[in-house]
C-alpha cells in the first residue's frame, strides 16, 4: 500500500492523510483515522475485597445511582464468584432500572481511572436493606455457581455475569441524571455460602 494524500477545500493547503490502492482498475484512497484518547471521565464502581453474599433471594447485589447533574453511561457490569456455594446451581439475575434509591447497604465510592478527574456524581451500594423501587427490567442472564474448586478451572470460570454495552453498533446503557435514577442487579435464586465481587464500568456526561 502506498501512502498518499488528497487536497481538500478547507483552508490553504489543507490535506487529508490517505493510503491508496487499486480497486477495479482505479486508484482509490482510504482516509487515515487516528483514534484519540477518550476525554470523558471514566469510573469503576466495585466491591474491592468485600465479598457480597448471594444467600438472600431477590436481593440487590449491586445498585448504581446517578448524581444530580450528570447522566451515567454504563459500559460494562462484571460479577465474579468469590466464595463457593454450599450446593452447585444455576442462578439467574435480572438487571433493572430503579426509580428510587435503596438505603442501608454497603456503599462503595467509584474510583476514577484518571487521578486528574474529579469524584463521580454517581454512587454505588451492595445489598441495600431497603431496596430501591424497581422499574423496567433491562436484561436477564444465568450463571453456574461452583460448589467445589477444580484444579483445572480458569479465570473465565469465576466470571459469572457479564453485561457488556461496548459494542460498536450498540447503544450504551444510560441512566438519566437525578438521584432517584439508577440500576440494580437482582439475584433471583438464593445461593447459600457463595459470595461475589462486582465491577461496574461507567462514564458521566452532561448530554
Image: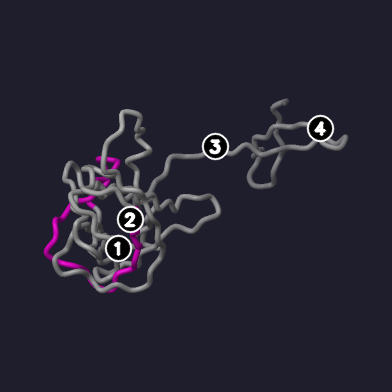
Gap between marks 4 and 3 measured at Cα = 23 Å
Which of the numbered marks, if any, corresponds to residue 34? 3
Outermost residue to the front: 87
Which of the numbered marks, if any, corresponds to residue 91? 2
Which of the numbered marks, if any, corresponds to residue 188? 1
Residue drawn at (82%, 36%) of the image: 23
Say whether residue 202 is visible. yes
Q: Earlier in the sequence, mark 3 or mark 2?
A: 3
Gap between marks 2 and 1 measured at Cα = 7 Å
Q: Earlier in the sequence, mark 4 or mark 3?
A: 4
Disc 4 target residue: 22
Secondary structure type for disc 4: strand
Gap between marks 3 and 2 measured at Cα = 43 Å
Q: Earlier in the sequence, mark 1 or mark 4?
A: 4
Q: What quarter of the picture does the N terminus occupy?
A: top right
Viewer-proximal residue among 23 and 207? 23
Q: Residues within 10 Å of mark 2 (few under 14, many from 20)?
A: some
In front of the other: label 4 or label 2?
A: 2
Amino acid at each position: 500500500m502506498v501512502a498518499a494524500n488528497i487536497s481538500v477545500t478547507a483552508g490553504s493547503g489543507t490535506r487529508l492523510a490517505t493510503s491508496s490502492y487499486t480497486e477495479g482498475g482505479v486508484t482509490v484512497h482510504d482516509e487515515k483515522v487516528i483514534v484519540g484518547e477518550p476525554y470523558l471521565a471514566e469510573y469503576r464502581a466495585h466491591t474491592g475485597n468485600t465479598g457480597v453474599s448471594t444467600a438472600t433471594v431477590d436481593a440487590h447485589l449491586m445498585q448504581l445511582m446517578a448524581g444530580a447533574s450528570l447522566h451515567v453511561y454504563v459500559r460494562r457490569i462484571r460479577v465474579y464468584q468469590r466464595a463457593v456455594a454450599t450446593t452447585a446451581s444455576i442462578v439467574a439475575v435480572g438487571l433493572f432500572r430503579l426509580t428510587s434509591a435503596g438505603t442501608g447497604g454497603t456503599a462503595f465510592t467509584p474510583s476514577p481511572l484518571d487521578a486528574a478527574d474529579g469524584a463521580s456524581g454517581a454512587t454505588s451500594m451492595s445489598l441495600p436493606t431497603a431496596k430501591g423501587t424497581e422499574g423496567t427490567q433491562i436484561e436477564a442472564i444465568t450463571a453456574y455457581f461452583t460448589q467445589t474448586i477444580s484444579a483445572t478451572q480458569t479465570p473465565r470460570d469465576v466470571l459469572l455475569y457479564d453485561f457488556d454495552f461496548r459494542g460498536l453498533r450498540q447503544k450504551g446503557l444510560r441512566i438519566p441524571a437525578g438521584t432517584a435514577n439508577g440500576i440494580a442487579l437482582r439475584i433471583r435464586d438464593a445461593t447459600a455460602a457463595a459470595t461475589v465481587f462486582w465491577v461496574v464500568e461507567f462514564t458521566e456526561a452532561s448530554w
